[in-house]
Amino acid sequence: MSAGRRLGFVSPNAPLLAAWVGLWVVLAAGAAHAQSLEYPVKANYLVRFAAFVDWPGSAFASPGSPIVICVAGRDPFGRRLDEAVAGQLISGRRVLARRVSSAEARSGCHIVYLGGLEAAARRELLAALASRPVLTVTDAADPAVRGLIDFAIARDRVRFHIDNDAARDAGLAVNSRLLSLALTVRGGRS
């Protein structure tokens, strides 16, 4: 005799309950798997964004200068970003990854990911970079502290919004192919 029957709490709906518990375990595992892929996908996006953005020549010290992707604040990527940039060449430029403080992110970076900063620090850094040719990328749910590109999770996939007006104001030209992949584009898909 099973322990449940000895204690008197076996339900006639036990198979249904077991199915629900099994489904919950599968869904939880799927959500955990999707979450575990979030930052590797974002790391790859950061590198791919560089291929679809044109910087003014003044953004580089020389024609052979690398494209530098900076992570300001806490780094959620770990080695994943380093793996994503390894061996990459975009428009004849190597791609490098650096971890920087907010102050260091104000120079020498072409793409700055600000996901690991508190809202006040993110707001301050975004304001400091607004007029510079720097592609700022955030995870902010608050529209007031979004970068030129803002990551979002939609239907369990990493997607993004683009502020094309602000990109143009910063001297950046975002390729129409990247604009077409965005969930939303502020300022049109020119």
Image (tube, grey):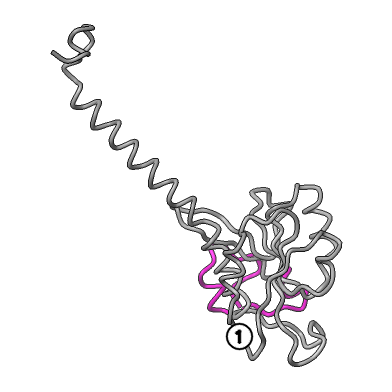
Magenta-drawn stretch contains 171? yes
Quadrant of the rendering where the N terminus is positioned? top left
Q: Is residue 18 left or right of residue 47?
A: left
The count of marks equals: 1
Residue 132 at x, y percent in the picture: 82, 73
**Is 184 within the magenta?**
yes
Task: Give percent across and percent down for residue 27.
Answer: 36, 42
The kind of residue tagged 1 is Leu
Q: Quadrant of residue 89?
A: bottom right
Above or below: residue 174 compared with residue 13: below
Identify the residue at horizontal 68%, vertical 48% (top origin).
142
Q: Residue at left 79%, top 84%?
A: 60
Is residue 64 positioned above or below 133 on the image? below
Q: Is residue 165 visible?
A: no
Judging depth in this view, the residue of 71 and 175 nearest the camera is 71
Residue visible at 34% across and 36% down?
24
Q: Is residue 173 left or right of residue 189?
A: right
The C terminus - image quarter: bottom right
Dot 1: what SS? strand
Q: Quadrant of the rendered structure where residue 10 is?
A: top left
* Residue nearest the observer in this picture, 20 or 33: 33
Q: Which residues are magenta?
A: 165-190
Q: Is residue 150 visible?
A: yes
2 over 63 or under it: above or below: above
Percent x, y for residue 187?
Answer: 66, 69
Circle 1 Cα neighbour tier, 10 Å, few/some/many (<14 / 14–19 / ≥20): some
x and y percentages locating residue 8 in the rendered image: 21, 6
Q: Is residue 68 left or right of residue 79?
A: right
Relative depth, front residue between 45 and 22: 22
- The residue wearing badge 1 is 89
